[in-house]
Image (cartoon, rainbow, N blue to C red):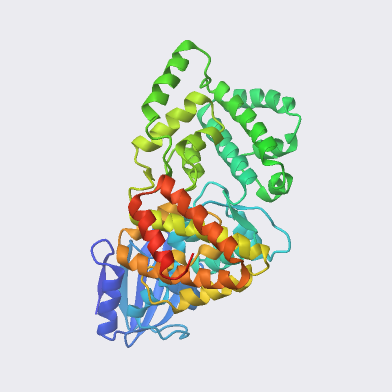
C-alpha cells in the first residue's frame, strides 16, 4: 500500500491509525525542512524509530510532537533494529506527562547560573539557555533530542544549576536590565550607545564588574554573574538597577524633563487610578520586552500600585507600560476568574506552608508525600499541581490556558484533597497557632483583593478538612 501526503491534510495520528489497524509492515518517513524521521512498522506495531538526533525510546516523544510536514509510507521495508514493540495509538498516553511538562516550561525563561561539577552533556544543555529563547524552543531544537534534553533540564533545575529569572530578586532585576540593554542596542546606534554606556559604567561605584560582564557582549555567561549578585542587599542593589535603567531611558529620550511629560503623568495617573489598588496576574506574554518586565513583576500578591513602585523605569514610562498591558488584555484582575483565583491562593498557601516545613527540616519529607499523592490521584486537574515542589512562583499563563477546559467543581474537589494532605502534614510538624496564622494571612489577603465567592469557597474547603 502506497501512502503519502501532507500532515496538514491528514494528521500523523490518522496515518498511524491506518497503519496499525491494517497491520502494515514498512517504513513511514516524516519530513519537514531538513528534519527527517523514519518509523518502522511490523504487523502494525512500531519496532524502530530513527530521528536526526535520537532513536527508539528517546525518539517516542519526538514522534509525538510532530505536527506538520509530509509523510510517505514504503511497504515491506524491514526495520534495521527491533528494539520497540509499540502500539501507535498508545504513544500519546505514554508521553502525555512529558508533553504537559514541555507545555508548563514552554514560556518560562531559565538562566544557567551554576556550571560546576557537570557532565559535558549537562553543561552543553545548560549553555543552550541564552536568556532569550523560551524553554520549549530550546527543547524542540536541542541537538540532543527532546527526551534527553527534558531529562537533563529536570536534573539541572533540581540541582539549581538552572534558575527561573524570578527565582531570586537580584537575578530578576539583573536579567531585566540586560534584556532592556540588548533591546536598546538593537534599536539605537550601537557604537554611540556603547560609548555613552562606557561613560556611565565608569561612574558606577558598586557592582561595576557585574555590569561590565553583562554588557560586554550580547551573550552572557550567567554562572559568572549570579555569584556576584545573589546575596547582595536587595534594596541597595535595586538602587543601582534604577540608576542604570534611568541612563538607558535618558539615552532613548524617554526621560521626564518638561511640562508636557508632567501633564502626561497626571493624565495617566487619573486614568489608571481605578485599577491601581487591584491585583492583576499575567495570562500571556508580550513580544515587547518592556511590557514583559511589567508582566514578570505581577506575582499574584502585588497590586498595580506596588508594581509601579518596584519598576525601575521613570514615572511616565511606568504608567505607559502598565496601561499598555491592560489595554492589550495581557492580564486579568483577581476576582474575574474564580478558577484562576483558587489556584493563586492555593499556591500562596503552599508557599507559606513549605517555607515553614523547610525551617523545620521537613520539606523533603513533605515533597515525597505530595508526589505520592499526585501519582495516586485520579483527578484530571492533578497535572496543574505536579510541578509545585520545584517552583517558587506561579506560572499564571500555563494555569490560565489549562483551567479553560476544566470544571470548577472538579478543581474544588481536587483542592479539598490537596488541602487535607497539606494540613494533615502541617499538624504533625507545626503548632496549631502557626497553621492558623498562615490560614488567616491568606484569607485576609483574599478578603481584601479577591471576590466574595472566592473567600466563601476557600473558607468552606478549609473547614471541611480542618478545624480553626
Is residue 54 at all visible to an observer of this figure? no
Q: Residue 437 placed where, x, y %?
A: 55, 57
Number of marks drawn: 0
Q: Residue 25 placed where, x, y %?
A: 33, 84
Q: Nearer the viewer, residue 439 or 269?
A: 439
Q: Nearer the viewer, residue 120 or 76?
A: 120
Q: Is residue 257 left or right of residue 90?
A: right
Residue at the farthest bottom position:
43
Residue at image point 71% right, 41% down: 233
Q: Residue 92 placed where, x, y %?
A: 37, 74
Residue at the farthest right position:
205
Q: Residue 244 placed where, x, y %?
A: 63, 29
Q: Quadrant of the N terminus?
A: bottom left
From this view, report whether residue 286 is shown above or below residue 453.
above
Is residue 39 at all visible to an observer of this figure? yes
Q: Is residue 70 left or right of residue 375?
A: left
Q: Nearer the viewer, residue 22 or 61?
A: 61
Q: Quadrant of residue 365?
A: bottom right
Residue at image point 57% right, 21% down: 250
Q: Quadrant of residue 84?
A: bottom left
Residue at image point 45% right, 29% down: 319
From this view, report whether residue 89 is shown above or below residue 458.
below
Amino acid at each position: 500500500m502506497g501512502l503519502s501526503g501532507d500532515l496538514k491534510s491528514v494528521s500523523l495520528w490518522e496515518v498511524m491509525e491506518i497503519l496499525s489497524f491494517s497491520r502494515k509492515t514498512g517504513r513511514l518517513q516524516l519530513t519537514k525542512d531538513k528534519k527527517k524521521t523514519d518509523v518502522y512498522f511490523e504487523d502494525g506495531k512500531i519496532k524502530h524509530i530513527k530521528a536526526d538526533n535520537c532513536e527508539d525510546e528517546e525518539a517516542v516523544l519526538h514522534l509525538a510532537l510532530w505536527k506538520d510536514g509530509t509523510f510517505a509510507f514504503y511497504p515491506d521495508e524491514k526495520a534495521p533494529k527491533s528494539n520497540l514493540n509499540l502500539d501507535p495509538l498508545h504513544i500519546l498516553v505514554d508521553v502525555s506527562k512529558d508533553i504537559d511538562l514541555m507545555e508548563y516550561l514552554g514560556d518560562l525563561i531559565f538562566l544557567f547560573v551554576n556550571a560546576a561539577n557537570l557532565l559535558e552533556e549537562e553543561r552543553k544543555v545548560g549553555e543552550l539557555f541564552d536568556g532569550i529563547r523560551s524553554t520549549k524552543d530550546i527543547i524542540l531544537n536541542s541537538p540532543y533530542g527532546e527526551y534527553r534534553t527534558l531529562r537533563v533540564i529536570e536534573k539541572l533545575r533540581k540541582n539549581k544549576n538552572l534558575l527561573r529569572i524570578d527565582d531570586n530578586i537580584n537575578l530578576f532585576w539583573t536579567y531585566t536590565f540586560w534584556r532592556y540593554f540588548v533591546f536598546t542596542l538593537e534599536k539605537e546606534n550601537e557604537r554611540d550607545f556603547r560609548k555613552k554606556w562606557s561613560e556611565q559604567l565608569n561612574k558606577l561605584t558598586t557592582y561595576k564588574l557585574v555590569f561590565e560582564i553583562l554588557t560586554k557582549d550580547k551573550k552572557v555567561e550567567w554562572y559568572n554573574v549570579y555569584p556576584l549578585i545573589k546575596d547582595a542587599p536587595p534594596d541597595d542593589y535595586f538602587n543601582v538597577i534604577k540608576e542604570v535603567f534611568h541612563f538607558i531611558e535618558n539615552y532613548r529620550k524617554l526621560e521626564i524633563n518638561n511640562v508636557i511629560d508632567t501633564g502626561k503623568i497626571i493624565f495617566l495617573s487619573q486614568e489608571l487610578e481605578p485599577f491601581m489598588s487591584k491585583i492583576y496576574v499575567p495570562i500571556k506574554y508580550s513580544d515587547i520586552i518592556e511590557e514583559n518586565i511589567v508582566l514578570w513583576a505581577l506575582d499574584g500578591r502585588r497590586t498595580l500600585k506596588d508594581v509601579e513602585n518596584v519598576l525601575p523605569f521613570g514615572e511616565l514610562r511606568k504608567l505607559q507600560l502598565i496601561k499598555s498591558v491592560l489595554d492589550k488584555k495581557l492580564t486579568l484582575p483577581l476576582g474575574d476568574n474564580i478558577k484562576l483565583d483558587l489556584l493563586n491562593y492555593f499556591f500562596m498557601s503552599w508557599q507559606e506552608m513549605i517555607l515553614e516545613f523547610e525551617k523545620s527540616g521537613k520539606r523533603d519529607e513533605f515533597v515525597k508525600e505530595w508526589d505520592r499523592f499526585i501519582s495516586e490521584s485520579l483527578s484530571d486537574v492533578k497535572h496543574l499541581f505536579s510541578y509545585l515542589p520545584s517552583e517558587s512562583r506561579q506560572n499564571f499563563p500555563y494555569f490560565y490556558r489549562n483551567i479553560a477546559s476544566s470544571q470548577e467543581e472538579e478543581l474544588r474537589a481536587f483542592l479539598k484533597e490537596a488541602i487535607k494532605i497539606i494540613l494533615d502534614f502541617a499538624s504533625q510538624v507545626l503548632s496549631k497557632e502557626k497553621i492558623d496564622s498562615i490560614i488567616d494571612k491568606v484569607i485576609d489577603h483574599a478578603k481584601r483583593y479577591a471576590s466574595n465567592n472566592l473567600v466563601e469557597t476557600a473558607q468552606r474547603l478549609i473547614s471541611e478538612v480542618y478545624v480553626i
